[in-house]
Amino acid sequence: MSLLKLENLSVTFGNFRAVDQISYSVNEGEVLGIVGESGSGKSVSSLSLMGLIDYPGKVSADQLTFMDQDLLSMPEAQRRKITGSDIAMIFQDPMTSLNPCFTVGYQIIEALKTHQGGTKKELKHRAIELLTLVGIPAPESRLSAYPHQLSGGMSQRVMIAIAIACNPKLLIADEPTTALDVTIQAQIIDLLIDLQKEKQMGLVLITHDLALVAEVAHRVIVMYAGQIVESGPASEVFSAPKHPYTQALLASLPESAAGRARLQALPGVVPGQYDRPKGCLLSPRCPYVTDHCRNVEPTSQGSLERQVKCHTPLNTQGRPAA
Amino acid sequence: MLRFIGRRLLQAMFVLLIISVISFMIQDKLGDPVQQMVGQSVPQQDRLALQQDLGLNDPLLVQYGRFLGRALQGDLGTSYYYKEATLDIILSRLPATLELSFSALVLVILLATPLGVVAAIHPKSLLSRAILIFSTLGLSVPIFIVAVFLMYFFAIEWRLLPSFGRGETTWVMGLWQSGLFNKDGLLHLLLPSFSLAFVLTPMFIRLIRAEMIDALQSEYIRYAWSKGISASRIYFVHALKNTMLPVITVAGIQVGTLVAYTILTESIFQWPGMGLLFMEAVTRVDVPLISAYLMVVGVIFVVTNTVVDLVYSLVNPRVRLPGYGS
C-alpha cells in the first residue's frame, strides 16, 4: 500500500519553480532515494511534505496524500498533529538543528509530550529508551547534556531518536550524513536502515551519495532543476540509466574515473531563476542535445514505477535510442 | 562560581576606586565648603580656623587617603544642608528609587516582550508596522514631555491618578519603607513608573524584534516546526529563549540609563527618592551629598552588572563562567 503519494507537486517562490510538477509515491517499508546536485529541489520538495515552506513559497499539487488523507486540504491543526509523529524528518546539520538553549532530554521529551503525552516519569523513561535505541552510551546522563556538548554524530543520533520517538510511518532524511565525519557516516546510515527495517517505516533518503543509494534504496529518483528526470528501481536506474543526466551523474563518480586524470563532469551548473532554458532544462549541458531538445520541453514517459523525462532516452548501450 | 564572584568583586573594587577619585575631586573642586557651611557673616579668622579643622589645608593625597579611609568605614561625609551622614540620607531615600526603577523595569519587560515578538512574527503586518512607528516615536520623545502629558491627562484632566509624591508607605521589617503594599502607594507609583518605562520600552521592542527575526530564521526553529509542536511554544519558548541572551546583556547596561532617568522622573513627580535628593543637592551645592550619591550609584551599577552576568550564564548554557562547572 502506498504510504505517501504525490502527483504534480510544485513549490513556487514568486515566478520561480523550485520544485516543478514532481510525482512519486512511497510504500510502507520502502526506502526511496532522491539524488541530484545542489539546487535541484530535493530539500525543498521534502520540506513541502512537512508543511515547512514559508511565505512567500507556495505549494500546489494535483494530489498530496499520506495514508489516503489529503495533506493539502486538511485543517492546519490536524496536519500539525501528523507532522512530527506520523511523518518525521531528520535534518542535514544536527549541530544547528537542535536548539542550543535546551537540553537533549528536554527536546526529546517535548516531542513525546506533544504527540503522546504521559507522566513525567514515563516520558523520561521513554527518552532514555530512545537514546539507548540509537546507540548513545550512558543515556541517563546524556539527558541533561546540551547540544553543544555533543559531537556531530551524537547530535545526529539524538535527532534520529526524536524522529522515531512517536513511531513515524514515514521518515524523511535530508542528507543526514552530509555534515558528519566520513567515519561516522556509515554508522549513522546503518542505524537508520536498521531502524527502518525494524519498524517497517517508509524512508525517503535525500543524498548526494550515489553509492549509498545504490546500496540501500529500493527505488531511486533523480532530480534536476526541480524536476524528476528519471525514477525507477535502484538497480535498474544505476545499471541502465535512461536519462543522460543520470548517466552523467554516475560517470562523475570517482570510481568511474579510474585511471583518468580528471573526473568526468558535465560543464555548467543547474540553471537558476533567471537563466532557465526554453526547452529541456538539461539542454545546455547535455552531450546528446538536439535542436528539438532546445526548443521543446520533454514530458515524462513511462509509468510511475519507471519514468524518464527525455526526448531521446538512452538504450541499454548508453546511447540515445532514436 | 565562587572564583567568578571573587574576580568580579576585585573588578568592582577597582571601578569603585575610580569613582571614589571622581567623587573626591568633586568635593574638593566644586565651590568652597567653608563658604557653604558658615555663610557671609563669619569673620575671616574663623573661616581659616575652620579650614584648618576640616583638613582642607593638607596635601591632596592626604585628603584623599582620609576620604577613602572614611568611605571604607561607611562614612561618606556629612551633608552641608541636612547636617547628617550623607549615606544615611541616601539610604533612607533608596527604597523609593529602587521601587520606581524596578517597577519601570518590570513594565518594560511586560510591554516590550510581547510587542517585540509580535512585530517579529509577521514583520509586514499592519500591527507590527504600528508597533514600529510607536517605538520610533517613543525613542524620539523625551521623558519630560511624556511625563508632563501623562500627568496633565491622568492627574489634572481626568483626576484618575495622583500627580506627585509617593503616597502612603509601610515599613517592611522595619528596614524598608515601601509603597508597594497599599493601594495609595501603588496608585502613586503608576504615572512615574510608566514615564520611566517609556524611556527603555521602544528600544527593547526594537532589540527583541531584531533578535527574534534572526532566531526565527534559524535551522533549529525550522526543525522545531518539523517536530509538530505548537506555534506558541515555538515563538515563546524556542525562539524567545535564544532571543533573551543579547536582551539580558543590554538590560544590564541600561540599568545605568534607568538610574540616570530616575533623576528626571523623580523631579517631575516630586518622588522622594535618590534622584530628587540629588537634584536638590545640586541646587544647594551640597557637595558631600553629590559625591556620596555618585558612590552609591556606582555600587548599584556594579552589583546589577554582576547579577546580569550570573543570570546570563543560567540562560545561555554555552557560557561557562570561569571556574564554574565542568
Image (cartoon, helix red, strand yellow):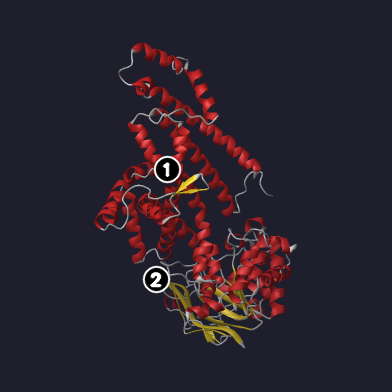
Q: Is residue A185 visible?
A: yes
Q: Is residue B152 above or below residue A49?
A: above
- Does dot 1 land on a helix, a strand or a loop? helix
Relative horizontal placement of residue A263, taking residue B184 as reference (left or right): right
Circles 2 and 1 on the same chain:
no
The residue furthest left is B157
> Is residue A269 among the parts visible in the rendering?
no
Q: Nearer the viewer, mark 2 or mark 1?
A: 1
Q: Quadrant of residue A122?
A: bottom right
Q: Give x and y (percent) for residue A79.
A: 52, 79
Disc sitting over residue A207 in the figure: none
Query: Dots 2 and 1: beta carbons under 8 Å?
Result: no
Q: Between B72 and B133, which is closer to the camera in this rendering?
A: B72
Measured as percent of width and height from the top left, residue A57 is found at 44, 71
Q: Dot 2: what SS?
A: loop
Instruction: Residue at 35% x, 55% y: name it.
Output: B135
**Percent x, y of residue A236:** 65, 80
Q: Position of residue B59 (x, y in %)?
A: 47, 15
Residue B220 vs residue A321, the one in the foreground: B220
Q: Chain of mark 1?
A: B
| Amino acid type, mark 2 | Gly
Q: Is residue A207 above or below residue B198?
A: below
How far is disc 2 from disc 1 in space, using C-alphas? 51 Å
Q: Quadrant of residue A251?
A: bottom right
Picture residue at 53% right of the left edge, 75% below the top: A50
Q: Amino acid at mark 1?
A: Val
Determine the residue positioned at 55% across, 46% down.
B307
- Residue A14: assigned label: 2
Q: Which residue is mark 1?
A: B259
Q: Quadrant of the N terminus of chain A?
A: bottom right
Toward the top, the furthest residue is B45
- Pinpoint the chain carrying mark 2: A
